[in-house]
Structures are given as C-alpha cells and as structure tokens.
Image: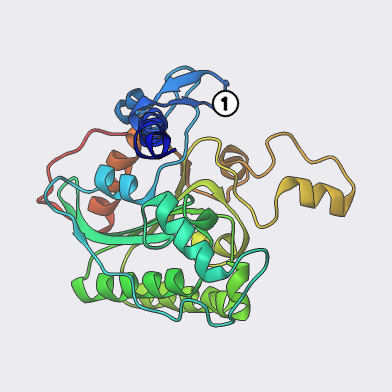
Amino acid sequence: MSWLSNFVRPKLRALIKKSDNANNLWIKCNGCEQMVYHKDLKDTLSVCPTCDYHMKMSASERIEWLLDEGSINELSIPITNIDPLKFRDSKKYVDRIKDAKSKSNSEEAILMASGQIGGNNAMVVALDFNFMGGSMGSAVGEGFLEASKEAIKLNIPLVIFTASGGARMQEGIFSLMQLPKTVVAVNSLKEKNIPYIVVLTDPTTGGVSASFAMLGDITFAEPGALIGFAGPRVIQSTVNETLPEGFQTSEYLLEHGMIDDVIHRKNLKYAIANTISLLMQNTTNENLPSY
C-alpha cells in the first residue's frame, strides 16, 4: 500500500492536474458550439473567431486589456463584514466565499483601478461574473463607492463594466442596501460633473441593472448581452405571453433607445477613449481611430 500511496497516487494526481491546466483546455463556444483553443481566445479578447460570440472576461482581464500598459494602479477592496447574517443554506456563506476566491482567483466580485485609456486618465471598475455570478454584496457596494470617491478626488471619469446576476442573497438586506448606496455615489459624480460611462456586458441583471448600471451619462453594451431585471423565462411565465424576439438583448435595447451604442469588444477601448477625450475636452490627446 505504501508503494501505491507514495508513488502511484501522486503521479496520477499530477497527471490529472496537468490535463486540467487552463492552457491545455478547449473551450466550447455558447454561440456556435464550436471548440476554441484557450490560447487563441487571448488574441481575440475572448470573442469566438467562428461566430463572433462574446464570451465572459474576468475583471482582471478587463482591466489589463483596457488600461494602457504601465499605467494600472489597482485600488484595495474595502474591508467589510464578510458574513453579517451568519448565513447558511447547503453550505456556509463563508465557505462559499472561500470557494469563489479559489475558483475565480479574485478577492471579490469587483476590481477597481485607475490608469490611462488611450492616454486619457480614468478610473475603471469591473465586475467579475466568475465570482459568485458577479453578485453585489457589501464589498461590491463599498468598492464602487470608493472608486467614485477616488474619481472625484482625481477629477477623472469613471468607467464601469457590469456583469452580474444581481444582489447577493446570502447578505439579505445588507445586499439590497448597496442599491441606494451606489445610486448616491453616481449622483455624487454628476454633482461634480465627472463623466460616468457604463459598459453593459453579458449578463447584467437584478439589483445591478436596477441601480448603477442604468445611470450612465454614456451607456455602451457588448453584442448579444442579456440586460434586464428578471430573466426572460421569469417574465414570460409571469405575464403568460410570448416575448418579442431578441427581448432583453443589447441590440433590442439600442433599437428602443435604452442605450447609446452596441460596440464590438475589439473596438471598445477606442470608443471609450474617444468618448472620454470628448467629454473631458482633452485636446492634448493623440487622435485615436474611430470605432
């Protein structure tokens, strides 16, 4: 048994771990169901090269791609009471947090950083759907508030990428309190004439869509993103009617005047940089290509 325990089992574990390495994985596209090699997605910004389906990006990937190289200054996530309700369903909330940190390699469902976008100073916030579905708890609300304060302090625009299933149920009323908190933060930006640019990504739903996600001075969205409060299946079962084709997609919202533009991911940085330059009247910025 010692030979099995000390040699064979460790070798098997190492072999399995190696095969699970992200660099060796093929990822199935939810749009065309084709298999895409993991490394190829880095070159396409996680957009399927076959059907142009926009896959999810982590918050860190968003920040690293959007902000100019060498300009990133990450903000610390404010310390909050991790489990104010001592919540437990099939698993303790604190254990779910630990699992989420391990799986997503993130500390929370939010990441904030200042830097430059095409030479324009900006504060960027990104929600991470890989961390408990990007759900908004106390840490996310406090993080958004902190980023807003820093944007006001530095007199730079705030750009946010939303990706969330809504409020974090494990925090109950404390999670719902983040809705008015983030709205107050947005109003503070508007009072100081600080531009607030929102980029809606797939999905943006629930409490996030009911608060800061729909309050942008300029609102962009990625193609095919699901945007709304409740999901289409919930709405359809409630109203007992067939919903219009494409209902709650970014294209549908653009057609009905709810957002300003739907922009391919490869063009988003140019669009955001040009928008900031225009709103901040930055005449010293180099001319960027039109998106």
Residue 43 visible in rendering: yes
Give 250 or 98, whichever is nearer the viewer.
98
x and y percentages locating residue 180 in the rendered image:
53, 78
Q: Quadrant of the N terminus?
A: top left
x and y percentages locating residue 263 in the rendered image:
43, 37
Q: Is residue 193 above or below residue 158?
A: below
Tell me the residue at 41%/51% (across/down).
Answer: 104
Q: Is residue 15 above or below residue 32?
A: below
Q: Is residue 16 above or below residue 156?
A: above
Give 91 or 60, whichever is nearer the viewer.
91
* 84 relative to 246 in the view: left or right: left
- In what element is the residue under mark 1? loop
Give 56 or 193, whichever is nearer the viewer.
56
Q: Disc 1 marks which residue?
A: 31
**Residue 44, quarter of the rendered image:** top left
Tell me the residue at 63%/68% (across/down).
Answer: 169
**Residue 109, quarter of the rendered image:** bottom left
| Amino acid at the residue labelled 1 | Gly
x and y percentages locating residue 33 in the rendered image:
57, 21
Tell me the residue at 22%/76% (across/down).
Answer: 153
